[in-house]
């Protein structure tokens, strides 16, 4: 199967969200660099993944291979999302910061794809990712400031994504921040300009 650009949007504001609109610009640039790659676009707010339940937890421990999991009803959503990720040469995540961390729909997606024996393995030295690394672009929109000298709120989102994606083998992360979006039109324009400048400055090999 041809490799893809996988785009995951998380905002409940859908296509009107600042994060989604900037992800549009980023995706357009990536497609210019990789014209033969189709874009697979998943909007989590429209189709949120199922929450992990007892059936998933039991099945995860007893059906670790992709072949076995594909036959198990409790793991079929997980398998579909993992295969979608495995097919992606590039991953684009666009998300708001909710209560200092990831929104619920993104956490639900993460819980489906981070699976013992399938996307990571436990060893005496710690967890080892089983997926191939790939360029991953994470667009984050926030009403306040959480980085740099203007930060007035904690950031439990970017460290968490580094840790959890690293657990499954994805470590090449590029964060594109849209901060201060609740501070008025001038702050929004400044945030967009900074983010667009960052996208334009990305080296070609990262696109």
Image (cartoon, rainbow, N blue to C red):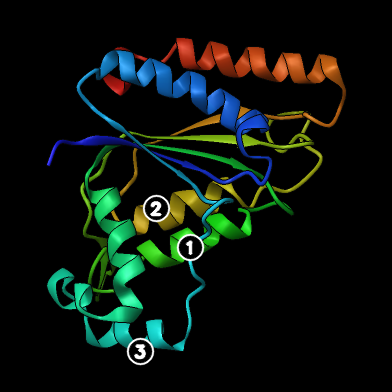
Q: Residue under circle 2?
A: 165
Per the image, the residue denoted by label 1 is 49
Q: Which of pointers 2 and 3 lies earlier in the amino acid sequence?
A: 3
Residue found at the far right of this picture:
184
Among the two numbered marks 1 and 3 on one chain, the one whose residue lies closer to the N terminus: 1
Q: In front: 98, or 81?
A: 81
Label 3 neighbourhood size at 10 Å, few (<14), some (14-19), many (20+)?
few
The percent position of residue 169, horizontal first and vertical second, equals: 28, 52
> Which image quarter: residue 97?
top right
Neighbour tally class for label 2: few under 14, some 14-19, many 20 plus, Cα within 10 Å: many
Judge from the rendering whether residue 124 lies leftward or rightward of residue 18; answer left or right. Answer: left
Label 1 close to label 3 by CB (< 8 Å):
no
Task: Tell me which residue sits at (83%, 14%) in the image.
Answer: 186
User: Tag 3's secondary structure?
Assistant: helix
Q: Residues within 10 Å of mark 1 (few under 14, many from 20)?
A: many
Which is more toward the observer, 75 or 96?
Answer: 75
Residue at 19% x, 22% y is 36
Name the residue tied to disc 3.
Answer: 58
Real-space Cα separation, disc 1 to disc 3, in angstroms: 18 Å
The alpha-carbon separation of the residues under discs 2 and 1 comes to: 17 Å
Q: Secondary structure at mark 2?
A: helix
Mark 2 and mark 3 residues within 8 Å of each other at the beta carbon: no
- State the residue at coordinates (35%, 20%): 30
Which image quadrant for residue 66? bottom left
Q: Is residue 202 above or below residue 79?
A: above
SS category of the residue bearing label 1: loop
């Amino acid at each position: 199967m041809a490799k893809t650009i996988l785009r995951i949007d998380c905002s409940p504001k859908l296509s009107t969200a600042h994060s989604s609109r900037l992800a549009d610009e980023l995706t357009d640039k990536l497609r210019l660099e990789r014209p033969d790659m189709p874009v697979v676009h998943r909007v989590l707010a429209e189709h949120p993944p199922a929450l992990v339940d007892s059936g998933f937890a039991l099945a995860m421990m007893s059906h670790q291979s992709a072949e076995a999991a594909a036959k198990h009803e409790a793991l079929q959503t997980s398998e579909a999302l993992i295969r979608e990720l495995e097919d992606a040469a590039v991953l684009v995540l666009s998300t708001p910061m909710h209560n200092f961390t990831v929104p619920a729909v993104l956490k639900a997606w993460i819980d489906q794809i981070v699976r013992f024996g399938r996307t990571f393995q436990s060893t005496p030295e710690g967890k080892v990712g089983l997926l191939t690394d790939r360029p991953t672009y994470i667009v984050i929109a926030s009403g306040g400031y959480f980085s740099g000298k203007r930060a007035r709120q904690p950031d439990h989102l970017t460290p968490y994504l580094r840790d959890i994606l690293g657990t499954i083998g994805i470590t090449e992360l590029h964060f594109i921040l849209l901060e201060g979006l609740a501070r008025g039109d001038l702050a929004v324009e400044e945030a967009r300009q900074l983010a667009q400048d960052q996208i334009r400055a990305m080296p070609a090999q990262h696109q």
